[in-house]
Image (spheres, coloured by chain):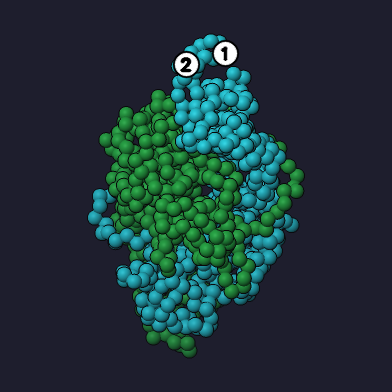
Chain colours: A green, B cyan
Amino acid sequence: MGKQFLEITEKKEVEKIIVDLSTKLAKKIATKTEKVKIEDGEALGRIASAAIFSPLDIPPFDRSTMDGYAVVASDTFYVVENNPSTLIIKGYIQAGEFPSPSQYVETGYCAGISTGAPIPKGANAVVKVENTFEYEDAGAKDAGGRKKIKKVRIYKPVAPAENIMLAGSDIKRGEGIVKSETTLTPRETGVLAACGIKEVFVRKKPTVAIISTGNEIIAPGEDLEPGKIYDVNAQTLSDSVREIGCGCVPLFLGIAGDNTEEVSGKIKESLAKGVDIIILSGGTSAGIGDVLPTAIEEFGEILVHGVDIKPGKPFVLGTVREKPVPVFGLPGNPTSALITFNLFVVPLLRAISGIHLYKNEEGREGREGRRRVKAKASLRIFSEPGRNEYVLVKLTKVELPEEDKFFAYPILTGSGAITSLSKADGYIFMEKGKEIIEEGEGVEVDLLTKPFSFRKRKAFTEKKNTF
Amino acid sequence: MGKQFLEITEKKEVEKIIVDLSTKLAKKIATKTEKVKIEDGEALGRIASAAIFSPLDIPPFDRSTMDGYAVVASDTFYVVENNPSTLIIKGYIQAGEFPSPSQYVETGYCAGISTGAPIPKGANAVVKVENTFEYEDAGAKDAGGRKKIKKVRIYKPVAPAENIMLAGSDIKRGEGIVKSETTLTPRETGVLAACGIKEVFVRKKPTVAIISTGNEIIAPGEDLEPGKIYDVNAQTLSDSVREIGCGCVPLFLGIAGDNTEEVSGKIKESLAKGVDIIILSGGTSAGIGDVLPTAIEEFGEILVHGVDIKPGKPFVLGTVREKPVPVFGLPGNPTSALITFNLFVVPLLRAISGIHLYKNEEGREGREGRRRVKAKASLRIFSEPGRNEYVLVKLTKVELPEEDKFFAYPILTGSGAITSLSKADGYIFMEKGKEIIEEGEGVEVDLLTKPFSFRKRKAFTEKKNTF
């Protein structure tokens, strides 16, 4: 009964619009920053919004890199195995201690030193413990006339600065340690910790408003009145935003009835909360094709109203406010919503996140990149002529020792069924003009979510969970 | 000055010990469960600890899958384009509404119905709106003698149940929807939402105690007294535990002095807190080789005390308490700590996590799997004879149109330097016996962390951040 006034846009055209939109939005998002604590893991995976410089020298002092003896290097010159030099030990310096004046070294003397301990004044090299022999000289007397002086024989010469890591030789005070726009991995957070830095300025996480629409939709946990169904898309889309790992934060703003006033109200609420992106999904398979464009036109402009793909045809894209806030209108069918999310929303979220990724040998992006596996079609698959079609498939592993491939089984329950969502591992793209995939033909499957598992199918014989 | 009494274990033997340990530990960890809310994203990526069954039919009622008219199917039999049947419209049922008795359908009548709306009593099929023509019959009178009766012409026959999704046809009440030990992706959380389920029992996240040791180590943010350095490993290891994505939670328990009492105290504290794994790292390059074994022997047994790898030789592994809690003793050098973490701790965390992964075409694991890229050595690389050596490398992209490869530059600053940590993208394994890698030779680089970026090197000319 809803009017259908779709002016279909080609998929490639939609993708181009999204690239343009992403570029504008990325600039805007890069300007929002906040300060986070490093210690509690908040900085991990975030993007430094400014360059960071070390406030101190690393190491902060001349540091021994060996267990041994801090010496005046020239006292060891020319020593050989059968003609060692002998030095008097002025005490021992442990890591974490600082040398006292009584441990300062001059020619003829040395100080025992452990790895990581500061070099005492006067010493300029460390002899490894393996090249020494320590003993007590019962016959010798020290300056105070006491007996049993500790001495050490040095069997190998050391050059000045040998076995010493000089203050600031690793990182100099004022040296840049993290460049602006670096994604902070455990390596960067470790370097920041080494410099005693506890907090760091990073880009704010982009926020994504999630709104479900439909008169029949109610939130899980509410009483299921006659004629109502529970909202699926709020959960699926929120968790998908979390799962793609771009650091975007979903913000579920509740369910709007299928009318312009309520949908406009939710858009207004999203803007008031300062979100960066708005995703609405329709409660019914008809989508929100009627109501959303009217609502968008109140605040901005419509860019796409219908795409030449199946499922996903009633996809809507617009922007609101002068600084662009993209508004995505996804079909209500859970599977159609998830496919259009993957096709059109994910590339935008990735582009604006500022997280830069390595690519693997095949030139595909790792981790946050596209998740695609090769498989063989297990059945002949037909597509509707003249449509870009996405066919849901379930993957099963082919257990052959020499290969590690999958069979792709098309799922025929239709995009309206919840079970399609739970059964499908991904989808095959059948481009306009490709009407048949033969049984056994190689296909590429874009995964709906990650990870997915191939455990042995268990029967549901276990004891029931109660809710 | 510390004694060295390492009884070196072969790397392969250590890996075998870790596999055994993982198997035992996985069983123990699988028994710990908790209830989490689905709505706030807490269930995403978690592992269902029991099978879940739907408490209701999906859809909960017979539901129209089309906009159109709910009819008695037999009223449409034999109709053709030029000989439609005409039915009286008993009102309209929108999605979210429930049919009133006045909308019940009998032969000769129908009800307008929108997609997702409940089928009224008496109707058993839906005719698509495209195959109808609605009009007002000004001449007709209804039962109450009013004029202008709404009628519709039906141009195509429908079979019983056509365009109706029957109650429970997608998911039946009591049907299993999530199997035990399933990793919950947005697809599963969506299905749970569809069934109105708000909470779910999942495995508890394994907890990993992180303890730094060393007399010279202080926490970032404290005053840097002479002779002290800031702790790096607590941050690097905690963030690495978070980053590998196995759902393990790091718990930093602070810094212990380099003595058995303090280290034992920290192990005792870890056990009291019920952690599943303990990771200690030594404050100095000497590692905690002396103190940790004595401390472990108080509570359990030592399994490994030294491995034939470089760096990482002073690696210690033990277990404490009758139910095995593995205790890893990593070298203090930040890079050595991160390499031994990757080699020995990561496989254990993955094995116990219960998260099962797909493998890509090359049989490598995706996402949480091993992160390895192919590269070419940019220089001749030498290894110490008779040692399994890990050579740190920095990766740079080879900008050739036909390939997407990397050059691996060995990092020569040594494993003690913090800058090694920040410069290295990964490491090359040079197995015992492999002493030279030629310039240009193909190598496989295991990544230290993910993601890593290849942005253009920027000069540090930006305005300074202040801390």
For disc 1, the chain is B
**Alpha-carbon distance for marks 1 and 2?**
13 Å
Q: Residue at x 27, y 59 (%)?
A: B458
Whether residue A47 is visible, yes or no, is: no
> Residue A268 or A303: which is nearer the viewer?
A303
Residue A175 sits in quarter: bottom left
Question: Furthest residue to the front?
Answer: B82
Give the number of callouts: 2
Whether residue A377 sits left or right of residue A359 in the image: it is: right
Q: Is residue A421 above or below residue A77?
A: above
Residue A174's image quarter?
bottom left
Residue of label 1: B143
Quadrant in which residue B288 is drawn: bottom right
Residue A122: x and y in percent read 36, 68
Do badges 1 and 2 share one subunit? Answer: yes
The quadrant of the image that shows the C terminus of chain A is: top right
Most extreme residue toward the top is B145
Q: Secondary structure at mark 1?
A: loop
Q: What mark, if any, has residue B336 been given in the picture?
A: none
* Apparent side of residue A449 relative to residue B398 in the rendered image (left or right): right
The kind of residue on which mark 1 rests is: Ala
- Identify the residue shown where x is 60% and y is 63%: A397
SS for callout 2: loop
Whether residue B19 is visible to the viewer of this picture, yes or no, is: yes
Residue found 53% across the figure and 57% down from its top: A381
Q: Is residue A108 left or right of residue B33?
A: left
Q: Camera-side residue: A267 or A104?
A: A267
Q: Is residue A293 above or below residue B19?
A: above
Q: Position of residue A68 (x, y in %)?
A: 48, 72
* Residue indicated by mark 2: B139
Q: Is residue A262 above or below residue A356?
A: above
